[in-house]
Image (cartoon, rainbow, N blue to C red):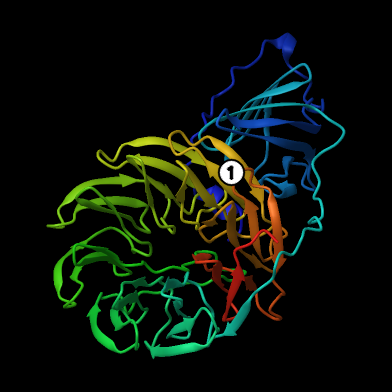
Amino acid sequence: MRPLAPILAVPLLALRLAAQPPAPAERRAPSAEPAILGTWLGTAGFPTDRAEIGFEFKYNSKHELKVYLYQHLMNFYGLEIPGPVTADADHYTNPDWSIDLTLKGDTLSGTYFPFNAPIRLVRTKTLPSEVPIPNLPAGPGPRWRVKLDAAIWAPAATRDSFAYVGTEGGVFHAVNLNTGKVAWTFPAGRPIFGEALVTDSTLYFVCDNGYLFALDRLTGAERWRYDLGDSRSSRILPHETVYDYEIKSPRPLLVDGVLYVGSGDSSFHAVGASTGRRRWRVQVDGKVRSSAVLYKNRVIFGTFAGQVYALDRTTGNFLWKKETHGRLNSNPAIIGDNVIIGNYNGIVAGINADSGKTAWRMLLWGSSVFSDPIEDDGTMLIGASDLRRVQRIDPKDGRVIWRTDVYGWAWARPAVKGDLIFQSVASGIPYDMRHASSFTALDRKTGAIVWRWPMPEWAGSYMNGFAAGAVVAGDYVVAGVVDGTLYVFPALRQ
């Protein structure tokens, strides 16, 4: 999505203090140029996540005082921030991006962006500028690839040397991981955006025709289907002028013979895994496009209305509800006693799974969150959208441990194997910033890129690359592409 959409949608929390009129001796003549004109460089953010930032203040063609953003982290190099800058003596504000600055000598300080992040700038002659993508090793390359019928949006499920994956064309496939041959297909009839749940005998997945399907894992024969009631729910895919993307459906959660799954008609269901019969159904606020997680005796999930719900898994009774101020596209994760969520407005938060109270929160600098957080050695790995980064974060307080630019949308959840992290990377062209799709391996400890296999552009398509998350299967890693190709890479450093 366009980077401004999430930023403007976040509640602007910065204080907008009315400056007191300065004493007559301090007033500048009306014709005097503001002292803030020029270029400034410094840092912004909280101690858990502080980054370099640059501003240029100048007049536009309408003689409005404007501020332009330069920041490697956000991949902006001269972005015109909406709204004018208001000057009152040495106090400068821009409510659109919650900028509140005071000039003292050659230093600008104050608050910036939602959450009132501290910012400090000094005059500079050099602002950040875009650098080329480095020439990185391409890695071992794909072991094999197979072209399926249509775009692949969901991660494959793997079991016993087979990958199971659905497509936008409405077909579910079982693919032999050793040979790349398709073992069986099942025509579900409508697009499939959800990851499957696979057991020894059965495969479960959600389809856009409104059904939860159960198939025989070995043959693909249908065992039953359950009506989730969302066959009329709309879906918006990536497009250069429409930004409310919906690229997921939930993966069913199986606990003690019961499947838990949400629906696009704003409902949540408990279904018998062997029979396909309803145990209970509850109505919630907003579409449920992400998966649920289990914590003690409760199921926890998010909605497009920005709500996180905790339900008693036996009865469906509501235990708590939490407002997150942005629709929830990504699947939550339980790490310790917290449920970790990320939303469209770029908020990542830890919510106590017992009480529903916020333990901590952070803002990914305006970048939407589609990536599912995963736990790794007591920390959290998560991708970002316009931020283009894969990040390792302390799940106790939101402190950023490291952050790596992968040069495109890291919408998918990371996957870990040995000392490597594998990240699917997608791109949109044309776009407001440079994106390049790839399949990338990072060092698990440092986050440094070990190798990067560039994905050739699919001619004529706005969307390119790997939107589906990588999945480790033995010594290989599996990932699907929006051109309909399923790839298998060796899980190696070179």
Q: Residue at x 38, y 62 (%)?
A: 290
Q: Nearer the viewer, residue 104 or 51?
A: 51
Viewer can see residue 266 = no
Amino acid at circle 1:
Trp
Question: In the rendering, at what x and y percent does residue 213 appear?
Answer: 29, 80
Viewer can see residue 334 = yes
Q: Residue at x 30, y 89 (%)?
A: 221
Which residue is the extreme one toward the right? 125
Q: Relative to 439, is 179 on the left or the right?
A: left
Q: Relative to 73, is 167 on the left or the right?
A: left
> Is 177 situated above or below 252?
below
> Quadrant of the image for the N terminus?
bottom right
> Is 36 situated above or below 98?
above
Q: Residue at x 53, y 29 (%)?
A: 16
Question: In the rendering, at what x and y percent does residue 380 appear?
Answer: 48, 45
Label 1 environment density (alpha carbons within 10 Å; few <14, some 14–19, many ≥20): many
Identify the image quadrant of residue 30: top right
Residue topped by disc 1: 365
Q: Nearer the viewer, residue 352 or 222?
A: 222
Identify the image quadrant of residue 421: bottom right
Question: In the rendering, at what x and y percent does residue 334 appear?
Answer: 36, 48
Question: In the rendering, at what x and y percent does residue 281 appear?
Answer: 17, 65
> Is 422 situated above or below 401?
below
User: SS for tag 1?
Assistant: loop
